[in-house]
């Protein structure tokens, strides 16, 4: 069961701008007990509660297949891990004396203030959250310091060489190929029953006649189409070979931009299509793809470097997790 103390939480969105996790709660319901010890630093119940609610809001969508209790347990577990890792990174940053540009911190505080109409409104919101100005600055100083440490670790450990870029490119060339694509509009008239009928065909033929006489395809689609995206003029966007039903697919890749098809009989009705644009197949060269590959490899290697660094910090730290309420 989700503990009762979580139920009165109300996320205040103006304060969400101020704080990473700005949450009001009934203080009488929260005992600020210690839930974890990380070296010489403690993580309190109130800290865990705040971050848990932050995760839980995201997990309503990301883990909607789980029960409410399962989402809560997952959110609390991930929240505690986040707090432990932040504590370790911040401790390490202090140990090696990572410095930040105080002007960046002041700029961030100024941006927060600017989201309020008056200084008084800002002060009242700050007071309501139970924070002082110094506490607010410290709350925002911490992630900046952690970010600087992470950047230092990545800069020291991650190097992407031209050889790595070339090896990835030649080993994954299919990623850098684009198939021919067609953007087209469609007008669709459905059969009155499951089989073709004269009335439906007659209606479709009249529409085709009007199109061939010069009437605007998109406007007729809005007025008469019974198919997809009729309100957008039947615009189907770009598609690749095989994206559409075989009867449609066969026609659209043969037409040139501006051309209108004859009637196309499908299992559920008659279609008329107009090709708007075509793009040929494309394959990026190594030179053209190098920045894409480098960024992809850098992201992958950076994540691995940080994970290894976190594992190292955890292995060399004293971490004790207390029993959850």
Image: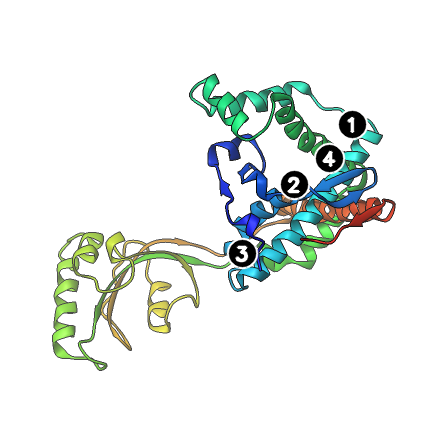
Judge left or right: residue 99 versus residue 237.
right
Q: Secondary structure at mark 3?
A: helix
Q: Residues within 10 Å of mark 4 (few under 14, many from 20)?
A: some
Residue 191: image quadrant is bottom left
Q: Residue 321: x percent and y percent? A: 77, 50
Left or right relative to 155: residue 236? left
For this orientation, the residue located farthest to the front is 28
Could you say which quadrant of the image residue 189 lies in? bottom left
Label 2: how many residues lie within 10 Å, few (<14), some (14-19) or many (20+)?
A: some
Q: Are marks 2 and 4 in contact (CB under 8 Å)?
A: no
Secondary element under disc 1, as helix, strand or loop, is: loop
In the picture of the structure, the residue carrying the numbered disc 4 is: 151
Mark 2 / mark 3, whichever is N-terminal: 2
Q: Is disc 3 surrounded by few (<14), some (14 to 19) or many (20+) residues within 10 Å? A: few
325 or 294, nearer to the observer: 325
Q: CA distance from mark 4 to mark 3?
A: 28 Å
Q: CA distance from mark 2 to mark 1?
A: 24 Å
Reading the image, the residue beneath label 3 is: 62
Mark 4 or 1, nearer chain start: 1
List the residue tagged with mark 1.
98
- Cα–Cα gap, marks 2 and 4: 26 Å
Looking at this view, is 309 or 173 the one in front? 309
Where residue 205 sits: x, y (%)? 15, 68
Q: Which quadrant of the figure contains the N terminus?
A: bottom right
Residue 93 in the image, given as x and y percentages of width and height: 79, 32
Q: Nearer the viewer, residue 102 or 154?
A: 102
Tell me the residue at 83%/44% (across/down). 313
Q: Considering only order in the chain, which callout, 1 or 2, is on the residue closer to the N terminus?
A: 2
- Ranked by sequence position, the earlier of labels 4 and 3 is 3
């Amino acid at each position: 069961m989700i503990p009762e103390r979580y139920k009165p939480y109300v996320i205040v969105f103006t304060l969400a701008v101020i704080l990473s996790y700005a949450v009001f709660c009934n203080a009488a319901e929260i005992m600020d007990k210690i839930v974890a010890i990380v070296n010489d630093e403690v993580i309190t119940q109130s800290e865990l509660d705040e971050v848990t609610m932050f995760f839980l809001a995201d997990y309503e969508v990301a883990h909607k297949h789980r029960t409410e209790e399962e989402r809560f347990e997952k959110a609390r577990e991930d929240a505690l891990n986040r707090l432990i890792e932040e504590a370790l990174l911040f401790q390490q940053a202090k140990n090696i004396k990572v410095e930040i540009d105080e002007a960046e911190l002041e700029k961030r505080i100024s941006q927060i203030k600017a989201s309020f109409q008056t200084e008084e409104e800002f002060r009242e919101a700050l007071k309501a959250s139970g924070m002082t100005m110094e506490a607010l600055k410290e709350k925002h100083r911490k992630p900046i310091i952690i970010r600087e440490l992470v950047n230092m670790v990545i800069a020291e450990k991650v190097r992407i060489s031209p050889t790595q870029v070339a090896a990835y490119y030649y080993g994954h060339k299919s990623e850098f190929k684009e198939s021919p694509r067609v953007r087209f509009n469609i007008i669709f008239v459905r059969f009155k029953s499951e089989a073709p009928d004269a009335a439906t065909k007659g209606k479709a033929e009249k529409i085709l006649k009007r199109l061939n006489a010069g009437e605007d395809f998109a406007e007729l689609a809005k007025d008469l189409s019974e198919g997809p995206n009729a309100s957008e003029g039947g615009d189907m966007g770009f598609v690749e070979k095989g994206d559409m039903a075989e009867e449609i697919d066969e026609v659209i890749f043969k037409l040139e931009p501006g051309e209108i098809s004859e009637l196309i009989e499908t299992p559920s009705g008659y279609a008329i299509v107009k090709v708007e644009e075509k793009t040929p197949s494309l394959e990026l060269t190594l030179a053209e793809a190098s920045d894409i590959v480098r960024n992809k490899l850098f992201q992958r290697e950076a994540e691995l470097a940080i994970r290894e660094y976190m594992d190292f910090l955890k292995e060399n730290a004293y971490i004790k997790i207390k029993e959850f309420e």
